[in-house]
Amino acid sequence: MVSTLRIPRLVVAAPSSGSGKTTVATGLMAAFTGRGLTVSPHKAGPDYIDPGYHALATGRPGRNLDAYLCGTELLGPLFAHGAAGADLAVVEGVMGLYDGAAGQGELASTAQLAKALRAPVVLVVDGSSQSRSVAALVHGFASWDPEVRIGGVILNKVGSDRHEELLREALDEAGVDVLGVLRRTPQAATPSRHLGLVPVAEREPDAVAAVAAMAEQVRAGCDLDALWALARSAPPLTGAPWDPAGALAGAGTPPPSGPRPVVAVAGGAAFTFAYAEHAELLTAAGAEVVPFDPLRDEHLPESTGALVIGGGFPEVYAPELSANAALRAEVAALAAAGAPVAAECAGLLYLARELDGAPMCGVLDASARMTERLTLGYRDAVAVGDSVLAPAGTRVSGHEFHRTRLEPGAGTAPAWGVVRPGPARTEGFVQGGVHASYLHVHWAALPTAAARLVARAVRPGAPV
């Protein structure tokens, strides 16, 4: 059914990474939420960490919008699904405004997303090392693509009143509205490490304080009324919102009858990477989704019939994960019994024999260790053989993001054949009901993955 979505919205972008997008976007989300608005948070690209801060700021799930992982045709429907019932949507961009998938034009860029959503862009500019040149910078970004509407600028890292005056004068000459000016505020900073910001789940009390500081910084330095008016200037969007049940029906995979199987989903500080749509698809496919924390829980949820272990930072918590021997044994026993187990990146490491010398679950005859080398980027892949997630030949778009190395990197039955970029290679493991891989895949683009996993899950009362 085609519908019209009338929701005020803003895209927060920047000329480059490090300009302050996360501070501004999260601060805006929290500040508008503090005004009594229901704010829908979104993040361009595959990043899992920023949406955790967005969720903390708004009380709603942070959702990703990624044209590479999901296809451009799903950007609008996924946005409409996430923004349902909200008064305002704020979308944090990725990298620089026009940066996207390497060598593929505007694909997966913030600019492409802003055009797809017909949303005005607020450009966050680091003003710390410039004055009048800011006008040339902003003019270039505003004129590069006439379909991208730059609605105004928020100046970040401004050093003094005089510095602010010079920047404002330059932008006034250029005819660009200044919607806010932020000074350096150390208390609003969020710590980083080898893969970016430290996730909310690992520092929740401090993260709450950081989000509150971002909100106060934005309230003090930004014209919220002007930003609200800009958001309300966005035209209506037409099209049907994405729906998990509809996605499964469209894929020809209705939920099975009988008792709802329990699908245990790893969470907690070690496994923080998850797309909200995955749990929604599992539920729509007929599962009872139950979270558990491998750092704290000594047993899998009662009647667990399938297991999903997503991404995160097991390398940070390897000793603690290893010490939970009872849970590791249950995971190994479930996998040995043939129950479906879907593991991505961190989950792959958890299923290995060891991680940095610490014993893991031993489901896979492979050993993992931290390295200095960052592996990062989009991947095009094809399923090498049939698995619990996909039949042989299924083509997917995924994302890889880690600093670990697994030896061997693929089993005798690999999970995927990576066809781009670089030379073709295989990676991951398919072993009984186990599908384990470094590749992060967004199931909104592959809803049959949820359906296949639930169909194979052990039902309550059935022998494992």
Image (cartoon, rainbow, N blue to C red):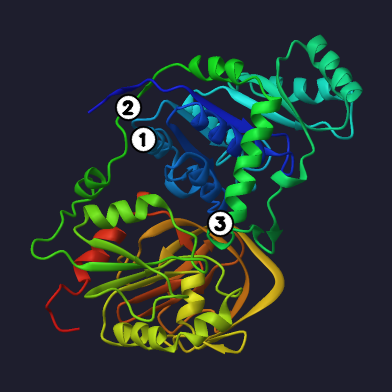
Which one is in front, 227 or 245? 227
Q: CA distance from mark 1 to mark 3?
A: 31 Å
The residue at which mark 3 appears reads as: 204
Q: Position of residue 332 (x, y in %)?
A: 36, 86
Vertical comparison of 360 with 140: above or below? below
The residue at which mark 2 appears reads as: 239
Vertical comparison of 238 with 215: above or below? above
Q: CA distance from mark 1 to mark 2?
A: 7 Å
Label located before the other in sequence (1 or 2): 1
Label located before the other in sequence (3 or 2): 3
The residue at which mark 1 appears reads as: 77
Task: Select label 1 or label 3 by which is in front.
Answer: 3
Q: Secondary structure at mark 3?
A: helix
In the picture, measured across the screen, residue 300 lies left or right of residue 9, that is left
State the mark number for residue 417.
Answer: none
Residue 40, image quadrant: top left
In the picture, measured across the screen, residue 60 lies left or right of residue 218, that is left
Q: Position of residue 435 (x, y in %)?
A: 38, 73
Q: Within 10 Å of the Cα at label 1, are there few (<14), some (14-19), or many (20+) other Cα atoms? A: many
Identify the residue at image location x=79%, y=11%: 172
Which one is in front, 124 or 256? 124
Q: Quadrant of the C terminus?
A: bottom left
Identify the residue at image location x=52%, y=50%: 52
Q: Amino acid at mark 1?
A: Pro
Q: Secondary structure at mark 2?
A: loop
Q: Is residue 20 visible?
A: yes
Label located before the other in sequence (1 or 3): 1
Q: Quadrant of the N terminus?
A: top left
Q: Amino acid at mark 3?
A: Glu
Q: Secondary structure at mark 1?
A: helix
Could you tell me if the residues under marks 1 and 2 are in contact, i.e. CB atoms within 8 Å?
A: yes
